[in-house]
Image (spheres, helix red, strand yellow):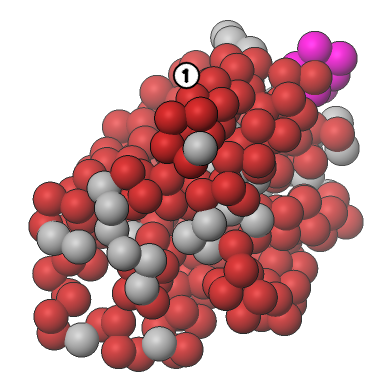
Amino acid sequence: MNIFDSIILGVVEGITEFLPVSSTGHMILTSHLLDISKDPFTKSFEVIIQLGAILAIVYLYRKTIVKDIHSMLKVLLAFIPTAIIGFMLYGLVKRLLLGNPWVVVISLFVGGLAIILFEKYYTKADEVGVVEGNIFKQVSYKQSVIIGLWQTLAMIPGVSRSAATIIGGETLRIPRKTIVEFSFLLAIPTMLAASALDIYKHPEIISEGNLTLLATGFITAFLVALVVVRYFLLYIQKNSFAVFGYYRIIIAVVYALFFLW
């Protein structure tokens, strides 16, 4: 991997982290296209630079994070199922799933169908007024745990963490804008823990020779995500998610036909 590769992956991460298209899946496919070897550093790089995109959420929602204790407690509660299951399956996921383009292609295709069907048959919940000091007033503590369980599906590359949590939240009758923002904030403890675990398991990845690549991808992802998050929030208020479902299917089919067979 070189600086150019880290910039490209940073752009891909920044664009896809909060869209229901799977940032990890896109980075795996992009790495495959760039012919980047799937060594331990590359796999860890694809996890750690996601913190760059997450930092954009920390910046944009800094007031909520500092002042809205009730909302952040719900976010942390939703993180618990992911933490437990993720720790238990870390080795299996890293060994068998990460870096496998076929896993990504299949997940993108199936997930795309799921999004299209969901958009076709699901009736959206009404957005109600937000109570000051608790932006997630519409999310109960029990629902927070259930959303966390939905998020664990995203341990499969290509599933999409945001798609899993958003669809899971909407099945609980949580309004779309609310669950999208909940998904944004849930990414903070989730990716912090994932990165910390990766560094703990493979401390050699933050050696001096790799820090420039990590910093480049991190900063690029942060800057791109700052722009994408703002436009995504505007988009969801008036548009369907079906376009992301069709996009996932097209990418899966095209990639399989031209780059895997």
For the residue pair 135 and 126, the one nearer the viewer reads as 126
The magenta stretch is 118-126
Q: Residue at x 72, y 19 (%)?
A: 116
Which residue is identified by label 1? 234
Side (left or right) of 148 relative to 76: right
Tell me the element at label 1.
helix
For the residue pair 256 and 250, the one nearer the viewer reads as 256
Side (left or right) of 101 relative to 74: left
Q: Give coordinates of residue 223: x percent, y percent.
A: 23, 43
Q: Which quarter of the rendering shows the N terminus? A: bottom left
Q: Quadrant of residue 118?
A: top right
- Image vertical order of residue 112 relative to residue 7, above or below: above
Q: Give coordinates of residue 50: x percent, y percent.
A: 39, 57
Side (left or right) of 260 relative to 160: left
Q: Residue at x 88, y 56 (%)?
A: 142
Task: Check if residue 129 falls in the magenta segment.
Answer: no
Q: Give coordinates of residue 60: x percent, y percent.
A: 38, 44
Q: Residue furthest front?
A: 261
Q: Give coordinates of residue 72: x percent, y percent.
A: 61, 59
- Image vertical order of residue 73 relative to residue 90, above or below: above
Mark 1 nearby-residue class (10 Å; few <14, some 14–19, many ≥20)? few
Side (left or right) of 172 relative to 206: right
For the residue pair 124 and 117, the one nearer the viewer reads as 117
Q: Amino acid at mark 1?
A: Leu
Q: Is residue 102 visible?
A: yes
Q: Residue at x 76, y 29 (%)?
A: 114
Q: Is residue 69 visible?
A: no
